[in-house]
Image (cartoon, grey):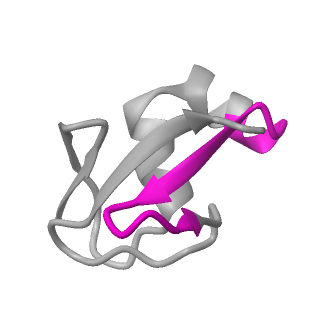
Amino acid sequence: MKVYINDNEIEVFQGAKLENALRCYSKKIYREVVRGEKKVIDQYGNQQLLQGSLRPDSAFWIEEAE
């Protein structure tokens, strides 16, 4: 299944969670999100939790946490 993080295509297994896709994208960014330094925003502007389920072609962006 394909999802997108910061406009980069990430291939993950069916049933993957956002944290799985984020680890594939960047382990460094994943750790920053876990520490609360960054946050993940979906294509609708909503902040997402790492345990969130993924749908094919979902898009996410990484932003600085406030």
- 56 in relation to 31, above or below: below
Q: Image height check: is 47 above or below 10?
A: below
Left or right of 54 on screen, residue 31:
right
Q: Looking at the picture, how far across and down is residue 2, in whole percent?
A: 16, 58
Is 37 a magenta residue? yes
Name which residue lies at 77% across and 43% down.
34
Q: Which residue is located at x 56 percent, y 55 percent?
A: 19
Where is residue 25? Give x, y as percent: 38, 33
x and y percentages locating residue 17 in the rendered image: 49, 68
Q: Classify 49 as above or below 6.
A: below
Q: Is residue 17 magenta?
A: no
Residue 52 versus residue 36: which sits nearer the camera? 36
Query: Could you say which quadrant of the image residue 47 lies in?
Result: bottom right
| Image quadrant containing the N terminus | bottom left
Q: Quadrant of residue 63?
A: top right
Nearer to us in this view, 45 or 19? 45
- Image check: 26 left or right of 47? left
| Residue name at image x 54 percent, y 50 percent | 40
Q: Is residue 58 left or right of residue 64?
A: left
Judge from the rendering whether residue 35 lies leftward or rightward of residue 57; answer left or right. Answer: right
- Look at the image and give the residue range highlighted in magenta: 33-47
Q: Which residue is farthest right?
A: 35
The C terminus is located in which quarter? top right
Residue at 37% across / 79% down in the picture?
Answer: 15
| Quadrant in which residue 43 is drawn | bottom left
Judging depth in this view, the residue of 52 and 59 nearest the camera is 59
